[in-house]
Amino acid sequence: MSYRLPGSDGDRATSFDPQVQPVLPSAPLPVLPSECLQLDYIRRAFQRPVDWRVEPLFAQAFDPGGALHVQARQAAVLMPLVQREAGLHVLFTRRAAHLHHHAGQVSFPGGRIESSDRDPIAAALRETREEIGVDRRFVHVIGTQPTLLTTTQFLMTPVIGELLPGFHVRPDESEVAEVFEVPLEILMDPGRHVLHRLETALGHGRCYFSIRWESHFIWGATAVLIRNFYRFLSASQGILIADAGKPAEGGLPPGPGSGIGSGRPPAGSGRR
């Protein structure tokens, strides 16, 4: 399902084309059991402690510490789960082409945490209402996941939420070009998580994940959050992955397009 406004996925504000950068080979990861992709299972997973670790390739972006943490701006996004007859879907937006930051890119509804917001959850719900017109009474919050430092120096808290029956999408065309859904089964297929490497003009390598769905190209911070959600669900099933996601050749790449290195990942939590 898609709610499209004028524009095209070809609009990009980046200085490079993320769709054509070299692909790094990576070790295969296990496929999740189908029960992990059910809404009831996800609710239960967030209601109990799960011993898991964030995506190790970008571990330091989830725990930047020091000056990076202090100087970054606080933000929150909502990962909206939608129950359809064919299964569970995830809702995304495609940002308007005229925006100054990340124009034309796929993202979750969300934005900066304002002083009037009680917490990241309140910010994510407010931004969702402002961007796509879904009122907070139609969002059941399931939990949160570890905060990610983005390349634009936002500390972004992902909020996992279920969109309740009766919600309606009314995109704000000044911010959103399209709202669309992707089956969770597609997003949680690790075979679709492609790792790219970009060589910058200064000679510094930067890496990022991407996921293709029909005409859409999901990449960068949004793809890392999806990858993290896969790792959380894997751990909730007792599936041990270790560092199987690292490139098959060479060392670990820097952070998700941010120049942040990676090392041993901190323990994460699917927080309620």
Image (cartoon, grey):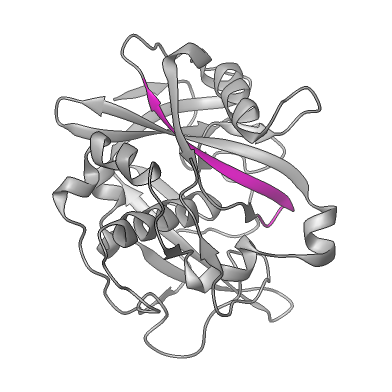
Q: Position of residue 225 (x, y in %)?
A: 48, 52
Nearest the eye: 10 or 33: 33
Viewer can see residue 177: yes
| Whether residue 107 is situated above or below residue 180 in the rendered picture | below
Q: Residue furthest front?
A: 48
Quarter of the rendering containing residue 11: top right
What's the magenta bit mostly, secondary-structure-wise? Answer: strand
Q: Position of residue 253 (x, y in %)?
A: 55, 78
Q: Is residue 156 magenta?
A: yes
Nearest the eye: 260 or 76: 76
Residue sitting at x 33%, y 32%:
181
Point out the stretch of residues depicted in magenta.
150-163
Q: Is residue 196 magenta?
A: no
Nearest the eye: 139 or 270: 270
Q: Position of residue 252 (x, y in %)?
A: 52, 82
Residue sitting at x 37%, y 60%:
231
| Whether residue 272 is situated above or below residue 174 in the rendered picture | below
| Whether residue 29 is situated above or below residue 85 in the rendered picture | below
Q: In the rendered view, does 110 fall on the left or right side of 190?
A: right
Q: In the rendered view, does 43 fall on the left or right side of 37?
A: right
Q: How many marks do you count on the picture?
A: 0
Residue sitting at x 48%, y 43%:
10
Q: Residue furthest bottom?
A: 250
Viewer can see residue 172: no
Quarter of the rendering containing residue 28: bottom left
Task: Pick the quarter of the image with the N terminus.
Answer: top left
